[in-house]
Image (cartoon, grey):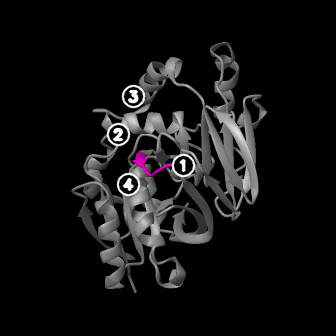
Amino acid sequence: MKRNLLIIVNPISGIGKQKKIESLIDAKLDRNFFDYEIAYTERAHHGTEITKQAIQKGIYDAIVAVGGDGSVNDVVTGLVDHAEELSNVPALGIIPCGSGNGLARNLKIPLSPENAIETFNHFKVAEIDTIQLNNRVVASIAGVGFDARVARRMKLAKVRGLQAYAKIIITDYPNYKEHTYRLNIDGKELERKAWFISFANSNQFGYNTAIAPKAQLDDGLIDVCIVDRIPLLHLPLTAPLLYLNHFELSQHVEFFKAHEVTVYNNEEQWVNIDGEGEHIGKELHFKNHPRSLKIIIP
């Protein structure tokens, strides 16, 4: 019996790799074992609506997100809403076509669309955690502070990609002030002055920048990374640690692992959720949901 795939394409995602997706699927997907349909998103979070409607049909073995981490998040949100009946929920597939592609990189999913499609032919499925943030779902990573500022500014940017991120960081870094955050980490109350705080399910933002080197997608835990302001003179030593997978060696970072975390005073009210700036509120509650998502891996 053939497996059925629904492939959800964000036509404006990332850097444009998705524009040839239909011809690549025809060329690389083994049609002896798979049938597929393609749906295109038309607005923000439309991918979640399409996913929920698809699950109700009960005919799909996997729902594939074609786009960046934001597009993946939209599909994950639709899938995780049905996580209590995981055995009957389709698996997530990813064809990375964004700029950062953090979750795909963590899972070692090929970044070229044609090679990513070929991984579906083996249909190897794993179960990974997700994070519930208030009424939202985080598949990869969330953050407050400067991290959220950059994501918010990228939301308004006309172009995507590493150069666009770098331009915003360089422009905003000198004048962005640290904030004092009150947190409850698995029942432990603490206060920290931070440049930004990340709440990680996967280990990286994207672009192979490993903000939480020890994070594992299936350990039932959130990796909390609290970063204080890094002086300009320290950047040449600190920045490479992100790419060398050793950010924990920086004197400007503090790590915790937790099942649940509450932030009481996110004064800016914005959060980076899987690369997208979202207005969530001042009080944030993060909770790990173990093995709540099936996903196709290489």
Q: Secondary structure at mark 4?
A: helix
Q: Which mark is residue 164?
A: 3
How many numbered circles does the render carry? Answer: 4
Dividing the picture into quadrants, the one containing residue 257 is: bottom right
Query: Could you tell me which quadrant the N terminus lies in?
Result: bottom left
Whole-angstrom CA distance, mark 2 to mark 4, is 13 Å
Whole-angstrom CA distance, mark 3 to mark 4, is 19 Å
Whole-angstrom CA distance, mark 2 to mark 1, is 15 Å
Query: Could you tell me which quadrant the C terminus lies in?
Result: bottom right
Magenta stretch in the rendered image: 277-282
Label 4 close to label 1 by CB (< 8 Å): no
| x, y percent for residue 86 | 53, 80
Q: Which residue carries the number 4 mark?
A: 71
Mark 1 Cα shell of 10 Å, populated few (<14), some (14-19), many (≥20): many
Magenta includes 115? no
Q: Is residue 102 visible?
A: yes
Label 2 close to label 1 by CB (< 8 Å): no
Q: Earlier in the sequence, mark 2 or mark 1?
A: 1
Q: Disc 1 residue type?
A: Ala
Q: Earlier in the sequence, mark 3 or mark 4?
A: 4
Q: Tell us which disc is closer to us: 3 or 1.
A: 1
Q: Disc 4 residue type?
A: Ser
At x 57% / y 39%, what residue is drawn?
208
Q: Which residue carries the number 2 mark?
A: 155
Q: Disc 3 residue type?
A: Ala
